[in-house]
Image (tube, rainbow, N blue to C red):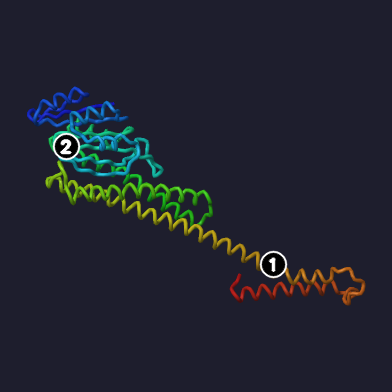
Amino acid sequence: MLTTLLYQPHDDSLLSGDEANIKAWKQSHDAILWLNIDGELTPALQQMLQADFDLHPLALQDASRDRHPPKIEAFEDHTFLLLRGLSASSESINCDNILLALFVGERFIITRHSARSLSIERTMNEVMAGNLSMKLGTGALSLKISRFVVKRYHKILFDLESRLEELESIMLTTADDKILAEVVLYKTDLTRLRRNFHYHVELFNSLRDEPSLPFDERLAHEINDVCEHQHRAASLADLFYQVSSDLIDGYISISAHRLNNIMKVLTIITAIFVPLTFIAGIYGMNFEFIPELKHHNGYFIVWGVMITITIALLLLFRKRKWL
């Protein structure tokens, strides 16, 4: 689906529509056009974008893919940004990514996303409601979209922080393999997010250090702000990845400690019963002439010896602090 917003500076008007706005934009010398493509970037659309906006065919190929690393590429009259945003249904760390392509020129911004993008919708709604003016420029609009993209990641990361704190408390008192499985899944999801965030950090660092058209010095503050948001997301993902690793190691250590305690108890029980079993084995042999076999109090004497050995061993283990 293709939608457009056409801003006319001379009368401060905003017109929403479809491809018809492209013709009006081309006939104006100062109008600003936002062209949004929701869905497949067909060959026909690619040809139209090449003809009307002079976009590079290889950049259009990258924008048409559903999987591609984030990147930035500067052209003579525009800048191409490729971001990884969150799908509309993503509300947790187990999220799905969508590719978000932006072609940003002095008088146009073209966005393409393979599935519904809440960041695009929110920015468009603010423009149409008058809360965000297109007269600020296409660079400011693209940075606004980028800020919305990373803020959605922030919410997911903050929710994960609370959950990790809960799991840390539970792990100290409960040994449950479901908890371990949950933390392992979080670590896997964070690995994927960390890769995305580090791509974005490099992308916006590059834009800040080597600005390209239309990102000039007037947008320096906005670019720094987006960079800070991206750095924060990346640092949070790294922190929670390490926390998840520590929780896994801690769970394994606690489980090993509990197993050692169990084995210690079983070993103590075995050590106590070994001499008792030895005595019972001797006097359980089927020989007729066992010396103490005919002793009147033999049964009670053997019990006394066994109880004495048991008490002596328990006292010894307690003295050695094994109990």
Residue sitting nearer the eye, 46 or 95: 46
Q: Quadrant of the N terminus?
A: top left
Disc 2 marks a residue whose amino acid type is Gly
- 82 relative position to 75: left or right: right
Cα–Cα gap, marks 2 and 1: 80 Å
- Looking at the image, which residue sits at the far front? 57
Question: Mark 2 packing: few (<14 Cα in 10 Å), some, or many (20+)?
Answer: many
Mark 1 residue element: helix
- 149 relative position to 210: left or right: right
Which x, y percent locates residue 116?
32, 32
Mark 2 residue element: strand
- Looking at the image, which residue sits at the far right? 288
Q: Which of the 4 image quarters holds residue 152?
A: top left
The answer to whether marks 2 and 1 mark residues whose Cβ atoms lie closer than 8 Å is no
> Which residue is found at the position 47% from the left and 48% from the top?
182
The residue that mark 1 highlights is 270
> Which residue is found at the position 15% from the left and 45% from the top?
219
Which callout, 2 or 1, points to the residue nearer the camera? 2
Disc 1 marks a residue whose amino acid type is Thr
Q: Quadrant of the C terminus?
A: bottom right
> Which residue is found at the position 37% from the left and 36% from the top?
89
Q: For residue 114, say whether it is visible.
A: yes
Residue sitting nearer the eye, 195 or 54: 54
Which x, y percent locates residue 118?
30, 35
Q: Which of the 4 image quarters holds residue 316?
A: bottom right
Which x, y percent locates residue 105?
16, 37
The residue that mark 2 highlights is 105
Question: Mark 1 packing: few (<14 Cα in 10 Å), some, or many (20+)?
Answer: few
Residue sitting nearer the eye, 74 or 311: 74
- 104 relative position to 67: left or right: left
